[in-house]
């Protein structure tokens, strides 16, 4: 299935996302004048979409990465099972991302 | 002049000119990143909407600072190898490939150094 190229795409996306982690840490280290704009950027709709994409990409890459390690050890080559597992990984990674956002909205009223 | 036979010199070195080192390093970092990325995800979720002081307090705990430092360094090594394999596969011109590989390394170093300095600043 398409999970192989999605693994690469999410990997490249996560690489770009490391800039956001750097921004978060630098803003926190720099003081309120820098932390405020970061939180505002994270809270606006475009920021929320980016954060959701990052959350899903991390979930997918983690789950599919574990599957890759299984392949290295010789497990998971049965075609039918591999297809089913691909669907499971896509669905579970989406559930994790949606779940994380639902949790954040319930606890904080917003994701930022 | 090298006394190595030509066969010995090339054995195990594929198109990336670095043998199996990247293959192993990518898998070792992948295994380390399983617990580290779960820790990062759970921690980040716990800090959603947090005030600046909460984030500072969180990272001032030695465990959290240490784990964040490990997560950043290991993730960036994993990232650098992963992006390099994408460049090796899709960028064919030798000049362009060299530029991409250098930018990839520069990116990992810049992000890594800035993250660690910010982290040290928070901790100290």
Image (cartoon, coloured by chain):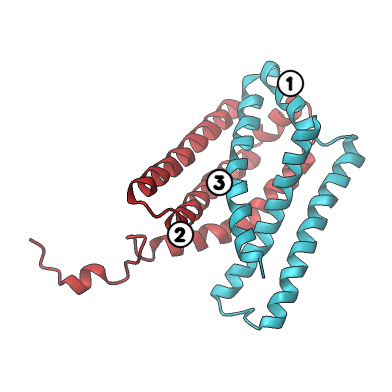
Chain colours: A cyan, B red
- Residue A54 image point, x, y percent: 70, 45
- For label 1, the SS is helix
- For label 3, the SS is helix
Q: Are marks 3 and 1 on the same chain?
A: no
Q: Is residue A42 left or right of residue B79?
A: right
- Residue A20 image point, x, y percent: 64, 35
Depth-wise, is mark 3 or mark 1 nearer the camera?
1
**In front here: B108 or A6?**
A6
Q: Report if residue A78 is visible in the image.
A: yes
Q: Report if residue A112 is visible in the image.
A: no
Q: Earlier in the sequence, mark 3 or mark 2?
A: 3
Depth-wise, is mark 2 or mark 1 nearer the camera?
2
Numbered tag placed on residue B70 in the rendering = 3
**In front here: B63 or B15?**
B15
Numbered tag placed on residue B89 in the rendering = 2
Q: State the CA–CA distance, disc 2 to disc 1.
A: 41 Å
Depth-wise, is mark 3 or mark 2 nearer the camera?
2
**Callout 1 crowding tier (Cα within 10 Å): few <14, some 14–19, many ≥20:** some
Q: Residue at x 48, y 34 (%)?
A: B110
- Residue A40 image point, x, y percent: 77, 25
């Amino acid at each position: 299935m398409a999970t192989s190229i999605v693994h690469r795409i999410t990997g490249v996306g996560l690489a770009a996302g490391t800039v956001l982690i750097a921004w978060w840490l630098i803003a926190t280290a720099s003081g309120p004048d820098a932390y405020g704009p970061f939180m505002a950027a994270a809270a606006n709709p475009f920021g929320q979409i980016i954060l959701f994409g990052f959350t899903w990409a991390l979930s997918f890459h983690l789950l599919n990465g574990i599957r890759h390690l299984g392949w290295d050890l010789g497990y998971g080559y049965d075609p039918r099972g591999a297809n089913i597992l691909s669907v499971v990984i896509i669905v579970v990674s989406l559930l994790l991302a949606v779940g994380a956002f639902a949790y954040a909205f319930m606890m904080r009223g917003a994701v930022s | 002049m090298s006394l190595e036979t030509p066969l010995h010199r090339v054995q195990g070195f594929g198109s990336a000119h670095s043998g199996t080192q990247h293959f192993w390093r990518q898998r070792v970092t992948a295994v380390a990143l399983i617990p580290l990325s779960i820790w990062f995800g759970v921690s980040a979720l716990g800090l959603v909407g947090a005030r600046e002081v909460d984030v500072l307090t969180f990272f001032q705990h030695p465990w959290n600072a240490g784990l964040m430092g490990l997560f950043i360094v290991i993730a960036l090594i994993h990232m650098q190898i992963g992006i390099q394999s994408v460049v090796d596969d899709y960028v064919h011109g030798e000049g362009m490939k060299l530029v991409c590989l250098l930018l990839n390394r520069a990116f990992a170093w810049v992000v890594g150094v800035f993250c660690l300095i910010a982290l040290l600043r928070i901790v100290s």
